[in-house]
Image: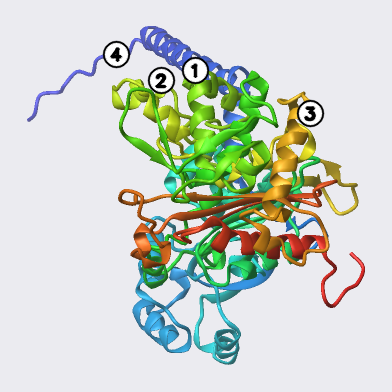
Amino acid sequence: MRPIRRQKLKNLHAEAEQFRRRALVGFLGIAVAMLGLAAGYFRLQVLQHEEYQTRSEANRVKPRPIVPARGLIYDRNGRLLADNVPAYRLELVPEQVPDLEETLAELGRLVALDDEDLARFRDARRATRSFRPIPLKLRLDEGELARLAVNRHRFPGVEVVPYLTRRYPYGPLFSHIIGYVGRVDVADLEAMGDSRNAALTHIGKAGIERYYETRLRGEIGYEEIETNVEGRALGVLRRHDARPGTDLYLSVDARLQQAMVDAFEGQHGAAIAIDPANGEILGMVSLPGYDPNLFINGIGNKDWQALQAPSRPLFNRVVLGGFPPGSTIKPFMALAGLEAGLVTPESTVLSTGEFFLPNQSRGYRDWRPGGHGRVDLRESMAQSVNTYYFKLAYDLGVDRIDPYFQRLGFGEPTGIDLSGEIAGVRPSRAWKRRQLNQEWYPGDTVNAGIGQGFWVTSPLQLAQGTAMLANGGWLRRPHLVQSSQDGFDRPRVPEPQPPARRVVTNEAHLAAVHDSLVAVMHGPTGTGRAAAAGAPYLMAGKSGTAQRTSRRGLQSTNPADLPYHLRHQAWFIAYAPAEAPTIAVVVLVEHGGSGSGAAAPVARRILDAWLLPPPEDTAR
């Protein structure tokens, strides 16, 4: 018989007390937890409300940029020089394509896909989510559009997307004025700074397109897009419209521009025509040129290699080219002598064929063996007598030549609205010491008197100086943009220009130089009289021949007998009508051999194109 186990009697009071203690601890724990939770909610919803609301909105709402239409560019008569035209690109959404490689192969049979297109697509695919469209070919022609339209059902995830692209209807004619736009690269984005500009696909790379990029670009707008957690667009919440780019009206004339190119008849060189009254550039060519349309969506390797020819089609000779000015410097040297009181229009110098510095046996030669006899200012210019200017430069000295030519704008950028303009070289003691660490010699001064030696001048600087001679001594900034317009419904606004500077005030001195330049073209001994023959208007001009090789002794050298690369640079400066000039012209024919023989006829054709009615139109 098992023993009976005694059961311990429960202490109900003690158990109730224990339960109350545990319940209190649990309640306190829950209360603390609730207070902590409430404090957390208070921090999130009250103290940090704005921060998390912004984060939430950023996750839900995405900005999508709206790229504005680029500003148009016109000539002075409203002819369109840079346009935006509809184009079509081929885009592909990778996640909607069943077999990507097979699709690319099939598309390659319908459209021309080169290695660059495929490489660009694959690079973009690695950096882009699979549900977003990726451009495969940036521009489709009409045949490709038609083939894609017929076979559209075969290619899910492939779309033809319309957009606006830049077009230059005149091709190479304005290449060195307008420049071109090209695809944006990393360096461009860093230079632009503003993150909104990351939406831009193209940016100005050269010419007016580059210089006025900010104004032509406009202001990017954006749409606020509601998205899901994967970033897919659900709808548009708000839209902030973009501001289109500013339209620019240039001072150039398309008809004159074409006439300037035709005047060269296939020769290489540069020419610029400028209005002396206001500094407006009427025409500007650098030959050979190039087709800016090649650069818009990326130039191919074959086309790029063709532009690396020795003739340098991409090089703007007007703004970037530096050349010795030769005898075109003589009118300005004559002004310096007159202003300094060293010569008068009646002062004469004897030209015997050679000029000698005191106590030196080396002679500096005139271009005519035997010399020109005794000449005054008028005849020294008409016959381009070197001896006259050798002596004048020596008498002036480099310390007076340097500051005077600085006042006339030589050796300084003109400030034209194009990027990269060179300053050139204005010879001086300081320049030679700085560049060559050598002393200045009297022979250097003599050579400077005829535009040789260390002189480096751009056609643009000579054009500014020639316009100054034509307008009564005023130095004006050459410029290309005449006016601008923000929107078709708003008026055109003239482009503000810096005030002109009066650099020559003595009208008698200007009249003496003017008379000598007219004698060059119309005098019986003038070196340019052949180019002026039969002109129904009066011209003032001066030829210049910048030597690339020296002759031996007094023997004359025929430029045509020299190798092409050693032939002299041929210059000509002119303005007309001489009594009331409306145009000043500078022409450089590379390796032309003779200013009066090669460059002067080109200048005459340019002046005729501006001053005479065109054959098809008797009224200007």
Could you say which disc has been placed on residue 429 in the image? 2
Residue 124 is left or right of residue 489, and the answer is left
Residue 250 is left or right of residue 417, and the answer is right
Q: Residue furthest left?
A: 1
User: Which of the 4 image quadrants contains residue 263?
Assistant: bottom right
Which type of secondary structure does the marked residue at label 1 adopt?
Answer: helix
Q: CA distance from mark 3 to mark 4?
A: 139 Å
Residue 337 location (% of width, % of height)? 61, 25
Identity of the residue drawn at 41% across and 69% down: 300
Number of residues whose C-alpha sits closer than 10 Å to that of mark 4, classed few (under 14), some (14–19) or many (20 or more):
few
* Between 236 and 19, the one nearer to me in the picture: 236
Could you say which disc has been placed on residue 9 in the image? 4
Residue 451 is left or right of residue 217, and the answer is left
Residue 504 location (% of width, % of height)? 72, 26
Instruction: Identify the residue under disc 3.
Output: 508
Location of residue 432 with respect to 572 vertically, above or below = above
Q: Are marks 1 and 2 in contact (CB under 8 Å)?
A: yes
Could you say which disc has been placed on residue 399 in the image? 1
Q: CA distance from mark 1 to mark 3?
A: 24 Å
